Amino acid sequence: MSKTEYDVVGIGNAIVDIIARCDDAFLSNHGMEKGFMQLITAGQADELYSDMGPAQEQSGGSVANTCAGIASFGGTCAFIGRVAEDQFGKVFAHDIGSIGVAFNTKPSDAGLPTARCLVLVTQDGERTMNTFLGASTELGPDDIDSDLIASAQVTYLEGYLFDRPEAKAAFHDAAKLARAAGRKVALSLSDAFCVDRHRADFLELVRGGVDILFANESEITSLYELNSFEEAAGAVRAEAEIAVLTRSDEGSVILSGNDTHKIAADSVDAVVDVTGAGDLYAAGFLYGLTKGLPLETCGQLGSLAASEIISHIGARPAENLQELAKNKGISV
Amino acid sequence: MSKTEYDVVGIGNAIVDIIARCDDAFLSNHGMEKGFMQLITAGQADELYSDMGPAQEQSGGSVANTCAGIASFGGTCAFIGRVAEDQFGKVFAHDIGSIGVAFNTKPSDAGLPTARCLVLVTQDGERTMNTFLGASTELGPDDIDSDLIASAQVTYLEGYLFDRPEAKAAFHDAAKLARAAGRKVALSLSDAFCVDRHRADFLELVRGGVDILFANESEITSLYELNSFEEAAGAVRAEAEIAVLTRSDEGSVILSGNDTHKIAADSVDAVVDVTGAGDLYAAGFLYGLTKGLPLETCGQLGSLAASEIISHIGARPAENLQELAKNKGISV
């Protein structure tokens, strides 16, 4: 076994977010379910974009956001995902590379543009996402670098990958390689509707394929088709090695065997944009875990990173997370 | 004479800003003069970008920012400038169109990408700009729609246009058309180094070609090659019909004949990013002027818009300026 080179290798969709403010009526007039993600076609993306107000662009993508967060804590991280050779592709590659995340997936030249997510942020800070996957759908098993997977303590995967068969195959290959190398596999359930689309697959993974599961309240209740958070938490405790359940301003719960750690949410002056809250919670948690910190501290780092991200527009850290942790007296 | 269709038509470089934070050492290590704008080549842009930290993208361009501000006040506005048919070009066109500014300049297909400005924001909120003009250099006299110019109360031009002979020719054509139609011509001096490059041309314009001149302290002292603001103000008073001189947190001074209006700067909780402060001051001022408001009120609207823009990242309004004005008791 080679010496560990990375704390975490993440695999996910490589996306640039196009972020605009709107009111609740805009969402309902466009048939969007507030707070969730839907996949849209290129045509739908063009149509929606032309209806939206002025926007700003920032790199996104769930696992990619987590990787940026881990790097901001000082962790070593690599990302696998597919962009195109266009301006958004350059933006994505620049942003993730410049924060110190290794990113060497070959850009697609198949003609599809880099993925974009039209993010609508309402007055309450809630975000509703509309994703055109574009070039990120070109990710497949060939992009999974087995040495890279074997070199990382944790391979972190997003449930969104299941929306494409080639990406799903890449996901399974990566998980298999990580396990064969004696490494950990972590999964984010991504979105309640995504869980709806792939429930059987995700249940199988939770029961055997992954070591650490991240889910929010709507995702975990969707997974088990249960009405209450408590019932869903009971169900996942019995099946997952470590389950990390986030509940927005009610904080998070970490379940590990019979242990339960309740972590309070960090308070913020004003919730500006919740985009990336779950991704950054995962960043803090995984960073702590790879540094061998207690699960409770991992959760505190998650809360800290989530509170930073919701205090501004966009899903990438605006402040250095390692410094924020130090300022809060958490030794990282 | 046809009925006025627009309050203001703006002509300028169509630019997407790529905004990143950095420390003062980064500026000096890269030979940049803090607080100013320099033109860079495509190669220099790529090199600088690869050295910069994670960024976000937002539409920019000096006069384009002003047009967006006028629209946010509720004014009617059109913009003339050249993008390419690429992703940044679509971003630029979307952002300016979605706020209600008419933008119909044909995109360039000459191969140059849409202009981008690498904006470095230091801890003090000061911005230092590095512009690759790209497709915006394709703007020329053919792009000046004479009916549009004749239909607008004010034609607003940026000094930056003088950096290219074709754009300079377009500038002169537009100014001539506006004057022939009995309209007003307004000019922003843009940047002290830009003034240095084109002093004779700018002096000639101030002495005869423009009705309203916008300049900050470093630009007006550069124009007259004088050391003190007071001397430069005295010089411009004798030559310009209306001179609007901005002085950052010291507010602004409006000179018109023998009249002097001193306007205080609006206070902000924290100066996050001064990019666009002058552009948005001009937006408030020109909006007020086209509504027939007293010069002092025009200046107050300028201060209000500038204070909004410096309280967040980016040079386009994040809040509705008409509502902000109403909340402040300025009837617009």
Image (cartoon, coloured by chain):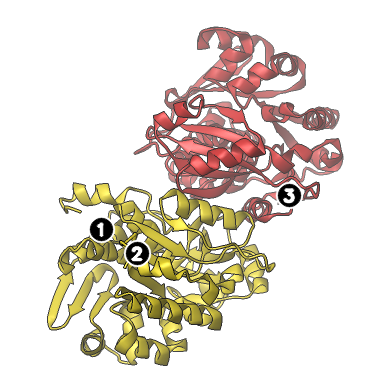
Chain colours: A red, B yellow
Which residue matches tag 1?
A: B304
Which residue matches tag 2?
A: B8
Q: Are marks 3 and 2 in contact (CB under 8 Å)?
A: no
Residue A330 shown left or right of residue A133 in the figure: left
Task: Give percent across and percent down for residue A48.
Answer: 54, 38
- Give the crowd class for mark 3: few <14, some 14-19, many >=20 residues within 10 Å: many
What amino acid is at disc 1?
A: Leu
Q: Nearer the viewer, residue A32 or A169?
A: A32
Check disc 1 and report its element: helix, strand or loop.
helix
Residue B185 shown left or right of residue B55 in the figure: left
Q: Which image quadrant: the C terminus of chain B?
A: bottom left
Check disc 2 and report its element: helix, strand or loop.
strand
* Mark 2 and mark 1: Cα distance apart in space: 19 Å
Label placed on residue A84: 3
Give whichever of discs 2 and 1 has the lower sequence position.
Answer: 2
Task: Give percent across and percent down for residue B113.
Answer: 64, 64
- Residue at 30%, 61% (x, y): give it: B3
Q: Quick check: can you spot residue B251?
A: yes
- Residue at 56%, 39% (x, y): give it: A47
